[in-house]
Image (cartoon, rainbow, N blue to C red):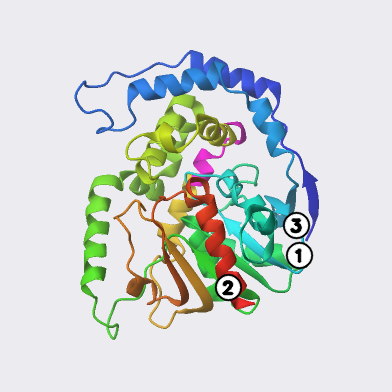
Amino acid sequence: MRVEPFEIAVPDAVLVDLQRRIEHTRWPDEVEDVDWGQGTQLAYLRSLLDQWASGFDWRAAEAELNRLPHFRAELAGLWIHFVHVRAASEPSIPLVLTHGWPSTFLEMLPLVPLLTDPSAHGIDGPAFDVVIPSLPGYGFSDRPRTTGMSTRAIGALWHELMQGLGYRRYGAGGTDFGAGVATFMALEVPEPLIGLHLTFLEERPYDGAGARPLSEAERAYLDDSEAWERDEYAYAAIQGTKPQTAGYGLNDSPAGLAAWVIEKWRSWGDTAGELDERFSRDLLLSTLTVYWVTETITSSMRLYWEQRHGAAPTFGRDEFVTVPTAFARFAHEYISEGAPPREYVERMYALERWTDMPRGGHFAALEEPRLLAEDIAAFFGALR
């Protein structure tokens, strides 16, 4: 495996073009009595894009990001970007953490100081060597040129990455698609994994002939999931079937990109509808800028197509993750309050730790990094 240092360096011309496009946005109208009920609110988006064009300092964000050690590794013919921060003390536990959509590697960065130097932050537990890759087709990772790059395939790449970095034993964790990647790492090649830490249930258990009957809590969770899909799943239906069609507009228009992405951050985070109360605008605009300058919104959405056409979203009858697993259930995960129930997770994983978090939503590493870091440290500390 070839590895090379990497520095984020966006050309000035790209930033100038971004500002020009924002200034020439052709805005739609909206009806007066629905607020966010038909999608991203016009007043909020205009305010956000005004700040993106004239009040947001990408160069400062870029310099701050470059204080971290960035690398690229060649895996399956693609250059994959990752942050690799070694523990402040030994012995340490290697840990690969993976983001999802509509996020980037930025989502996991608040965990870095807490996990690499836990004692300095009053956290009781082991120190970690933290590896945070950008998914293929996201941010500064290469975009796949052919189909087949599902979460199952990415799991195999992450094993190659960790072993190429010299780690024989390591842990894995993540959320959203990242939870699926970690799951397939454990399902396909469990031997190198010390443990698995998840905050989201990306896959579904086998529930066909021979499976135990669903509990009342499981039925309620599945009912909530069906209701959520009826009201909120249109984005995934598009991305899972025709991502290329949607990609033309999102790749061409900063307003279109921001509207598509920001509405999910408001809906999926523990925001109570107040996006700015939970996420700083600098964070949101940094995330949008990573998508924009790398032109990866279309390739990021293709992972939905891969999941629909490649990696089965439901476990087979005999599939079960034997790697010790922890699940942190954040109180305001987007499908339903406190979802999923423990017994549903136990259908798929050798569950050894379960934590009900008092707050936080889908972007847990950004929303409640300390709660998450403490849970990761306690879980892996108990496994040693």
Instruction: Report if residue 92 is visible in the image.
Output: yes
User: Is 19 positioned to the left or the right of 333 in the image?
Assistant: right
- Mark 2, Cα crowd under 10 Å, few <14 / some 14-19 / many 20+, is many
340 relative to 333, above or below: below
Q: Mark 1 points at which residue?
A: 164
Image location of residue 233, percent across then percent down: 31, 48
On-image quarter of the N terminus:
bottom right
Q: Nearer the viewer, residue 142 or 168?
A: 168
371 relative to 340, above or below: above
Quarter location, residue 344: bottom left
Q: Mark 2 points at which residue?
A: 195
Image location of residue 135, percent across then percent down: 58, 52
Q: Name the residue under label 3.
A: 86
- Mark 3, Cα crowd under 10 Å, few <14 / some 14-19 / many 20+, is many
Image location of residue 9, percent across then percent down: 73, 32
Outermost residue, front side: 122
Q: What stretch is highlighted in magenta?
A: 292-300
Q: Mark 3–mark 2 contact, CB under 8 Å?
A: no
On-image quarter of the C terminus:
bottom right
Q: Which amino acid does label 1 sit on?
A: Gly
Which of the marked residues, 2 or 1, is nearer the chain's N terminus? 1
Quarter location, residue 182: bottom right
259 relative to 217, above or below: above
Q: Which amino acid does label 2 sit on?
A: Gly
